[in-house]
Image (cartoon, rainbow, N blue to C red):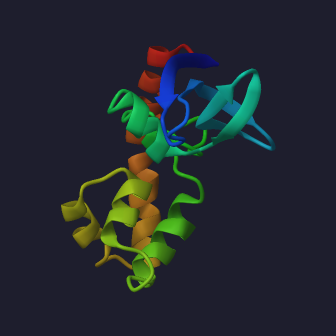
Amino acid sequence: MATFTKIITDRSNKNYAKHIKLNVNVQMSKTNHEYFSITYEAIWRGRLESCGAGHDTIRKYFGTQFDDVIPMHLADADGVPMHALENGFYYMQNPEEFSDEVTANHFRVSLEEVQDLKKLTKEQLSQWVEHRKPLWAEEAKAIRAKYGI
């Protein structure tokens, strides 16, 4: 696990400022399989205030520092997005619920590429996912090397 720490100041209470230790953890987690995880922990006075996969919180305090690994969150050890085919196809079949940006983030592709993917049948998308796996594996290898995980 690689941990990055920053002390932030919370002034939401006008009577005092809280100095919070914010840890960002980048790791390979394992339940029934190994997967990428980037989470945060906010600690004040030795007590856990909040934690989780709050990528908006991470970006708020760390800027773009983790923009390479945030898209990998929950991808398997080879960089394949969680339930790549099933989730991606579902997102594209339900555009009233999921924007093209959701699909682009899931597959880690551009919005233009999503337009091409929308034209594919599920079988064709399955083939696309299989052909994409070596690229995802290279991304995963680079992230693991960069963060030493």
Q: Position of residue 8 (x, y in %)?
A: 49, 25
Left or right: residue 142 versus residue 82 is left
Q: Position of residue 15 (x, y in %)?
A: 55, 36
Tell me the residue at 42%/23% (across/down). Answer: 142
**Relative to 84, is 49 above or below?**
above
Front-most of residues 36 and 97? 97
Q: Position of residue 48 (x, y in %)?
A: 74, 32
Tell me the residue at 30%/53% (across/down). Answer: 109
Q: Quadrant of residue 115?
A: bottom left
Left or right: residue 123 versus residue 24 is left
Q: Position of residue 87 (x, y in %)?
A: 54, 67
For the N terminus, give its image quadrant: top right
**Relative to 122, is 70 above or below?**
above
Front-most of residues 11 and 53? 11
Tell me the residue at 67%/40% (across/down). Answer: 50
Q: Quadrant of residue 113?
A: bottom left
For the C terminus, give its image quadrant: top right
Tell me the residue at 45%/25% (across/down). Answer: 143
As drawn, the residue found furthest toward the front would be 15
The answer to whether any part of residue 39 appears in the image is: yes
